Image (cartoon, coloured by chain):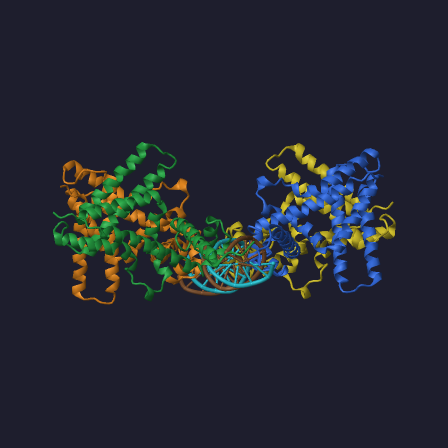
Chain colours: A yellow, B blue, C green, D orange, E cyan, F brown
Amino acid sequence: MSPRTKEQNEEIRRQRKQEILRAATLVYAEKGYSATEIGDIAAHARLARGLVYHYFKNKQTLFRELYEDIMAKTKQTTVSHFQQVRPPLELLSEYARLVCMQVLKEPALSRFYMRISLDVHLLYTEEQLSTFEWVKAFIEPIASVIEQGVQQGSIRQGSVNLMAMQFWGAISQGMNYLGQLQQEQKGTTEQTENHQLMTVIEEVTETALTIVRAE
Amino acid sequence: MSPRTKEQNEEIRRQRKQEILRAATLVYAEKGYSATEIGDIAAHARLARGLVYHYFKNKQTLFRELYEDIMAKTKQTTVSHFQQVRPPLELLSEYARLVCMQVLKEPALSRFYMRISLDVHLLYTEEQLSTFEWVKAFIEPIASVIEQGVQQGSIRQGSVNLMAMQFWGAISQGMNYLGQLQQEQKGTTEQTENHQLMTVIEEVTETALTIVRAE
Amino acid sequence: MSPRTKEQNEEIRRQRKQEILRAATLVYAEKGYSATEIGDIAAHARLARGLVYHYFKNKQTLFRELYEDIMAKTKQTTVSHFQQVRPPLELLSEYARLVCMQVLKEPALSRFYMRISLDVHLLYTEEQLSTFEWVKAFIEPIASVIEQGVQQGSIRQGSVNLMAMQFWGAISQGMNYLGQLQQEQKGTTEQTENHQLMTVIEEVTETALTIVRAE
Amino acid sequence: MSPRTKEQNEEIRRQRKQEILRAATLVYAEKGYSATEIGDIAAHARLARGLVYHYFKNKQTLFRELYEDIMAKTKQTTVSHFQQVRPPLELLSEYARLVCMQVLKEPALSRFYMRISLDVHLLYTEEQLSTFEWVKAFIEPIASVIEQGVQQGSIRQGSVNLMAMQFWGAISQGMNYLGQLQQEQKGTTEQTENHQLMTVIEEVTETALTIVRAE
DNA sequence: TATGAATGAGCATTCATTCAT
DNA sequence: TATGAATGAATGCTCATTCAT
């Protein structure tokens, strides 16, 4: 019956916030910002509605944190991936694989990425957000590697930012395709199908790479 | 003071519906289905809120019509483009240009396309809509031309559907980039900038083409 | 092409008003005042919605006229029936038959009577309407005949107004029963059934009469 | 500041629902289904509009529960009254008194009964509701006692159902008369008037009884 | 910290009424 | 006189947010 220590409380608090954010990701991926109800999130996290407001000031704040959380992680993953000292083309192809594998593990993520660029303006005022900002997590590190490749001659000439975005576009649609396939195979746990998904990932990667490869 | 003839009324109805659908496109591109208010649409069309319900049974119906309208037009444009008898690579590069030019003329369209795939499940029940259906307007005709190119040897081997989607992904992100640029240049009507946009379109096209080109 | 004469116009006007009132009766019997839409009435009368407002200032006015119209007719029928010089009991039993026959001819009427006492306060302000007023059309003449019967000894002692209302209540529920029966026999035009309805009318009449008969 | 226990919450829910249903009865008796606004009900219950929707899915559902609630109680009262082993005529006359007394205590009830038969089709689809169903609560038990009386010879021959309905009609109009009288005497608390009402109840009862009594 | 009852602003929808033709 | 398009106030319902416990 002794009250919880400060540390215990903070740990609980941290955990609850994570649970809520995780639930929010799932619901958000399905419905988008406006259609997502706080009650839905609470239900997914198996919490009372009111409790959400104990951890987040309001819906907008919750989603800002979610956005910043995921973007930070994404940026972290991306940056650390591209910090490896390897040929740019290898880095890019490995990156495509990495991202696709993530979709298999966490299908909601792919829809999260698709939606968030459309909703981000609901989360911040224009002053708080340069229009391109949200892409930085993905695009900037990619662009930077492309830049290197161009100088080394392994990647073809062109606007590196645009090339990075189109590279991302090709991967993104690939993830989409992958997600649909996986959805259709729900329930099945055959080796064959798992293998098939891997083949698709390879093809997505290969195709995306043609965008940047020199010659 | 005789009443309007049936023809006059039908003309009015036709026009009003178009005005409402046009207004809906703009608001929708900005906010998405859930966040779009009928009042917003009415205000954009400079009509009373109630009138929208004179022409459309309800919000969902309105958006179904909008969706079907735009998809029909898109399919029409796409199909008739790809019906021309020209080398597949030429058709594809010309198509990329076509789509980009449309974005310059009608910037809302690009956001419409991005959003609709995420919202379409709000408009129809699962039975009414195969998951991939919405892409058919774009993807199917592209895939069909890619198929031809593969047989002729001008397009590289691979899953034609996946390739078509990634081709579309590259264009889509290009449109995105283009839209942002144009937005930033709003107000300016310099020749230079117009020229710059054209250069970007060429680059978007060229990059998208690398995805499919053989070798 | 000569314009209509004043007389013709007035005749048309009179007819149109009657058509609208007739349509209103049907819809009203089905739905009641609040749920009745002007559009419904117009549709029943095969007129444009706006035209209703050409003939009636507004919904309330329309229903006031309808109410007064029907009540006037009812009163007229009732009064003229009871003006006959015949024994009170005969007059009352004949009256019950009369009312039941009307229901067979015009089934909406029975529901009209049931509803109107509940809705009449929506049509007039309290000052315009003594609470009992609506019953006068039926109750007053009946009460007056009952009064006679009491004095002649053919009708039992008691509050004539209350007795009149209860007499009416017994008929009213009889009409109700009759209406349901008729409804169920819709489509059938057998002699047998017609005969059956007549037998029911006789029973309704006979039962109602026990209320007033002396001894 | 521990949260309410499950029991406390259930108690609150039970109470609130009852408050809302009670308020709904009053407003409904006054205005009928279509004209009753949820806001009105909330105001009568001194609650926020939204809360009504916390307890009832929508207006129709609320009124279905209200209907079923009251009909269940009515049936309960009626059935248990007629289960007593006493001569049919005594049971019927006592029943008339019972019903009239209820009107004095709860004047809204009489109007509720009058309205509900007209509105019940708005609450259920045709499949869910046999046309005569609503009357069962009143009519069936009455008819059953009448049946007994007929066999014992204390009640005259005839269709028991029809007789039951006409018996009910006579009582119903009596209640109506009573309600009006009581309304007019609002404010006055004279013994005399109370006595007068009792006399009227006796007369209503006596008259209703003539309908069924043999001879 | 936790619960879910309570509030009320906001949006979808309806419908009486007006208006241009 | 006749039509149906147009308006907007009113009402059902939802949902972010607050509050009592």
Quarter of the image for the N terminus of chain A: give it.
bottom left
Q: In this view, does B30 lie above or below B208?
A: below
Q: How many labels does the image show?
A: 0
Residue placed most toward the observer, B27 or C57: C57
Kindly tell me whether residue A2 is visible in this rendering.
Answer: no
- Between A85 and D174, which is closer to the camera in this rendering? D174
The residue at 57%/55% (across/down) is B3
Splitting the image into 4 quarters, where does residue A139 fall?
Answer: bottom right
Is residue B146 visible in the rendered image? The answer is: yes
Nearest the viewer among C49 and C183 is: C49
- Say above or below: C28 vs D150: below
Q: Can you tell which quarter of the image residue B90 is in?
A: top right
Quarter of the picture containing the C terminus of chain A is: top right
Q: As drawn, is D79 to the left or to the right of A190?
A: left
Position of residue B8 measured from the top left corner of the image (x, y, whole percent)? 62, 53
Q: Nearer the viewer, residue C58 or D23?
A: C58
Residue C173: percent from left, percent from top: 28, 46
In the image, residue C69 lies at what x, y percent?
Answer: 36, 55
Where residue D96 sits in the image (x, y, percent)? 20, 50
**Residue drawn at x 31%, y 34% as measured from the top left:** C193
Q: Which residue is pictured at 14% across the width and 37% down the height?
A: D152
